[in-house]
Image: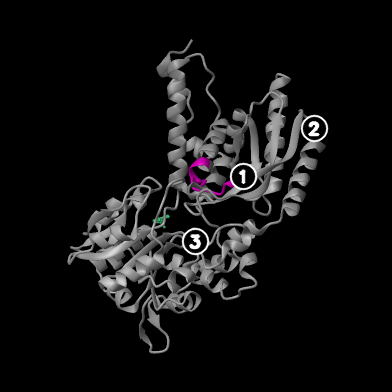
Amino acid sequence: MKNYNEKLRDIPAVDKILNCERCKLLTQIYGHNLVVEAINIALKLLRKKILINQDMKIPSSEMLCQKVEGYLREEMSPCYKRVINGTGIILHTNLGRSILSDKAREAVDIASSCYTNLEYDLEEGGRGERYDHVEGVITKLTGAESALVVNNNAAAVLLVLNTMARGKEVLVSRGELVEIGGSFRIPEVIKLGGVKLVEVGTTNRTHLKDYQDAINENTGLILKVHTSNYKIMGFTKSVERGDLSSLAKKAGIPFVEDLGSGTLLDLKNYGLNDENFVQDVIKTGVDVVTFSGDKLLGGPQAGIILGRKEYIDSMKNNQLTRALRIDKLTLAALEATLREYLCTEKVVNNIPIYRMLATSLEELQGKGEKIKKCLLGIRNKVEVEVEVVDTRAQMGGGSLPGQSIPSLGIIIKLKNCTPIELERKLRKQTIPILGYIEKNNYVLDLRTLLPGDEEIIIKSIYDIMLEEKNIAEGK
Ligand SMILES: *Cc1c(COP(=O)(O)O)cnc(C)c1O
């Protein structure tokens, strides 16, 4: 028997592997350097294996090539990729919140592949402002005097506080000192903005008088924060924005609202309440309001700041604005999304999150029955049970807490595969499928599926069924 060193000498040399036909092809696709790197990794692994098992057969160059190809494929396939959302949460923060409209996607495509008038004034033939592209449309839609857009709503709140109240006090109800998504905490952002937080009222009840009593010559502004991701129930009281606005006006200080999730549509028509309706917020007389671009607006990640021109102008002059500025691809998507709202009768159909929200239960039933029929059609492979069931879908993304809408889902049961295993297997597919387990059933909500997702789900379950069958038959 050969010893370790002799065995190592039998391993094909890098050049030999490089010269086999398959590897030549790989070099054409991926380039010489990456292929050599992959070969070296494959060989290193092989040497390790030989060290553990000196009796092992040394693989041929061709076999090693296969390993190299597998490695290259993995290295080149994106880690950040498409998934299928069967969670029933339309704006799922971990799944990228909103999906863009067709027009928004086209705009991103152009802005990413062509030169644009990003900061160029085509009328005057000189330097322009990137914010000008959206300010007109958004003020028209909302009735606001002026507008500015930044990287996200967290940036918007920071910029507003830093510009309007640096070195001063800001009044916030104790019921509104929220944390959003683990990293955005109102007290921390206030501190970062160079502003002093003055808490008013209590956790469950805050009265107008609490604000009144806290106002002094150092007060910079009153801030109202939308409690986006939770609701306090029971003995509660918060002050209406109209009353806060009047109080601020009397005291000669600005009133600002962090709306979190703002919508330009009145959601009453969808069985949801309308507390996030931006037009109403503006009408009530807030001086400045901020909200996200990728929550109920259905656009890209962005922070939208609306309000009085004098305040927006000073924000534009704040050095922070440069650091927080919106990038050109996002700006393109945001402008296109906003223009969708100009076609009032079409917007629900054109913005994907609203199309999902408005899909009828009949349509969902049809989708569910189709998946069920396909899966039951291949039942002879492995036993599968499919059931279309009532579910509740949510808007999500820290908007409309505690509110849900009727939806439908499918329960999938495979023989020899627990719901937990099925969840894991579907999550590990090339296009991962994300559902949830409820009452020991694996459920995929149909409302958050996109066109074409059904086929992928059916194919994936079919693959898992085949795999199960092969295992059961000992193949
Ligand atoms: C979501 C949210 C934020 C953070 O917005 P991003 O766009 O995610 O930065 C801030 N405040 C409130 C009230 C929110 O709901």
- Which SS class for mark 1? loop
Most extreme residue toward the bottom is: 124
Q: Mark 2: which amino acid?
A: Arg
Question: Looking at this view, is 443 or 129 the one in front?
Answer: 443
Residue 150 in percent (x, y) is at: 37, 65
Nearer the N terminus, badge 3 or badge 2? 3
**Disc number lying in front (1 or 3):** 3
**Magenta stretch encompasses residue 6:** no
At 32% across and 49% down in the image, what residue appears?
202
Asked whether mark 2 lies closer than 8 Å to ligand 1, one says: no
Question: Looking at this view, is 124 or 368 the one in front?
Answer: 368
**Above-or-below relation of 455 to 3:** below
Q: Are marks 1 and 2 in contact (CB under 8 Å)?
A: no
Asked whether mark 3 lies closer than 8 Å to ligand 1, one says: no
Q: CA distance from mark 3 to mark 2?
A: 48 Å
Q: Which mark is residue 275?
A: 3
**Above-or-below relation of 117 to 42:** below
- The crowding category of the residue bearing disc 2, from other C-alpha atoms within 10 Å (few below 14, some 14 to 19, many at least 20), is some
**Above-or-below relation of 78 to 250:** above
Residue 240 in percent (x, y) is at: 41, 62
Is 131 situated left or right of 368 in this image? left
- The crowding category of the residue bearing disc 1, from other C-alpha atoms within 10 Å (few below 14, some 14 to 19, many at least 20), is many
Q: Which residues are magenta?
A: 74-86
Nearer the N terminus, badge 1 or badge 3? 1
Q: How is the image coloured?
A: one colour
Name the residue that disc number 2 marks. Answer: 379
Nearer the N terminus, badge 1 or badge 2? 1
- Which SS class for mark 2? loop
At 42% across and 61% down in the image, what residue appears?
259
Q: CA distance from mark 1 to mark 2?
A: 22 Å
Name the residue that disc number 1 marks. Answer: 86
Q: Are marks 1 and 3 in contact (CB under 8 Å)?
A: no
